[in-house]
Amino acid sequence: MADISPSTSNVPNEAGRFGLFGGRYVPETLTKALNELTTAYTEAKQDSVFQNQLTELFNDFVGRPSPLYFAERLTAHCGGAEIWLKREDTNHTGAHKINNTLGQALLTMRMGKKRVIAETGAGQHGVATATACARFGLECVVYMGAEDIRRQAPNVFSMKLLGAEVRAVETGSRTLRDAINEAMREWMSSVENTHYIIGSVVGPHPFPLIVRDFQSIIGQEARQQSLERFDALPDLLIACVGGGSNAAGLFYPFIDDADVAMLGVEAGGRGSQPGDHASPLSYGEHGILHGSMSYVMQDEDGQTCDVHSISAGLDYPGVGPEHSYWKDSGRVEYTSCEDDDAMHAFDTLTQCEGILPALESSHAIAAAMQQACKLGPSKRIVVCLSGRGDKDSNEIARIKKEMATAAASNQ
Amino acid sequence: MSAIDTTFEELRSLGKTAFIPFITAGDPDLEFTGQVLAELEKCGANICELGIPYSDPIADGPVIQASYTRALNQRIKLNAILDNAQTWTAGLSTPLVTMVSYSIIHRQGLERYVAQAKHAGIAGAIVPDLLVEEAPQFAAICAREDFSLIQLVTPTTPHDRALRICETTSGFLYYVSVTGITGARQELPPEVVDQVSWLKSKTELPVCIGFGISQAAQVKMLSQVADGIIVGSAIVKRVASAAEIGKAAALENVRTFVQELVAEL
């Protein structure tokens, strides 16, 4: 039985703890900036001018509220519960990431800083950061793993057009995890005049709190739209989880609604063997990575393991501390979806609804298709369609060619 | 009193500044690490810092990062490092401390890590990602076990916070000379001297300076105020030269360099 106390949403505490998880495990050099950020955010949260400015940006620049769309043909295809899509793919820049980067760009200026750094995996957060920086005239440097630069070429080009400098990270697995390491190292030196816009609900306190709050617009809108459209709350919420920002944004405003079930979907990659997936909530251990305590894929010495996902945005060995808290309290269930199932969901949604989902979001769609069959027609599922798939078209073409070649050689 | 406290007591009575070199365990292999430690002691090191390789070091620059990667690529495990350390410390009179990420300590279990390290003859730990707010539990174990917990103060640390850090620090206080990551710098910020003088006026702890130091002139200047000088990347770089010029020549490189720095103290 889930432990849903009225206080489940009342986290983190002042030390940035979500139960056991979260906190702050970083070099002393960063403490001052993190304290400044905490103060700036606490003040901004109470400041109606700041909040109005953000709302205006959400409405006129991002195009919010994003639609809650009834996926009629997908629902019929699955033959069960109604599938509704929270269309974050319709946002300016094509994903939920812009909700966070605009909020943090406003905070950057509030703190009197003029330069921003960011990391990116799929490139969506990089583009969203570069966009916010262009909008406000902030200098922008984006760290991106060399492997991800290959996988997400269109986004790299967009970032450069937007005036950002993209720095390739050649260390480690050359993916999101290494991009975060490199961004944090640069922040160690530039912390006095630079803000680090982290892209997910990860990192040291107060980042998991700030990113969750800025992304909560997803769940706030979905809640109101559900009441308007079907006069009830959804029975089940589903979102993909890499670091977990779109999931946290959708789930958080419903956390105290005990009748709303929630399912987070991690990247199951090629299977359950270590190194084949990126599912710390399903297979990982309590550990420390990138400044907070959470579930993480690590070996018996505490060294972070290499992980795999078809989608660059989910290819991460850690996860936000609040998801770890929700998992251990039983409030949210977590599962994982393998590469092939995500690809199948990508094709199905594209063909049934005329919507190309991001490979990340395709993991959530795959889980929704399964759950819809299980739940039956009287139930409603809201899925966060966190981003659009145009950025993945080259990668999908490559994978489909590989699959065709493999199929041909098996015949 | 830990071995580190004894070392500083002796140095103070002689009016001397400690030389504290850093090397990475298992770079390129554990046997060579043992040889380098012995050489460092011969050259006049007073305490040696042993870096435990970690997959995601945030505070380290390219030189130390690369050394961690080399060691981890050799699949060097914590158990093997600590087993070897037991042999090394038996042959050294210089205390050995580990520079170790809290990710590794947390994974071992705090009690178990301290017990294992003590069993290996290690005198303390520098934990670069353990802030004073998160430190109480580990600090209590270290205090009970007489295992030095060396904490860091940086140029961005406000004065009141620095004093709070001193309260749970033992062995020595590590003053980080620069706002940034490890790695040799041509110039160090001029305010280092004032900062360290202020700290020394407020704490009985020895105050040692690290990050960025690679030149004899820097050692000479900082030895006027510091109780110890920590040099890492500049030594690790010379250890790494073994891959090109062989271990004997790399060891000779380390010897020449360290002797040059120690001569300034």
Image (spheres, grey):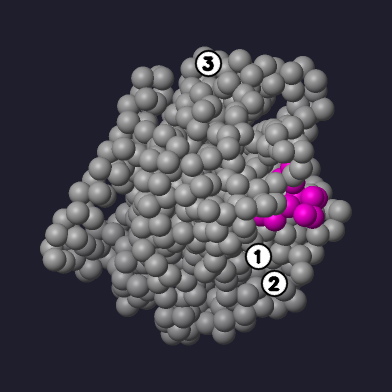
- Mark closer to the chain start, 1 or 2: 2
Mark 1 vs 2: CB contact within 8 A? yes
Disc 1 and disc 2 on one polypeptide chain: yes
Query: Is A284 above or below relative to A309?
Result: below
Instruction: Please report, as a chain letter, where disc 3 is located.
Output: A
Nearest-to-viewer mark from 3 and 2 = 3
Camera-nearest residue between A325 and B73: A325
Coordinates of residue A197 in the picture (x, y in percent): 56, 34
Instruction: Please report, as a chain letter, where disc 1 is located.
Output: B
Residue that appears at 40% across and 40% down: A350
- Mark 1 residue type: Leu
Query: Is B20 above or below relative to B158?
Result: below
Coordinates of residue A338 in the picture (x, y in percent): 41, 60
- Mark 3 residue type: Arg
Q: Which residue is mark 3?
A: A135
Coordinates of residue B106 in the picture (x, y in percent): 61, 68
Q: Quadrant of residue A18?
A: bottom right
Coordinates of residue A291 in the picture (x, y in percent): 59, 52
Nearest-to-viewer mark from 3 and 1 = 3
Q: Secondary structure at mark 1?
A: strand
Relative to residue B165, is residue A117 drawn left or right? left
Would you say residue A37 sits in the magenta stretch? no
Rounded to the nearest whole Å, what is the CA distance between mark 3 and mark 1?
47 Å
Which numbered disc covers residue B142?
Answer: 2
Start and end of the magenta stretch? A252-265
Camera-nearest residue between A313 and A220: A220
Q: Which residue is mark 1?
A: B149
Name, please, the residue furthest toward the right.
A6
Rounded to the nearest whole Å, what is the CA distance between mark 1 and mark 2?
6 Å
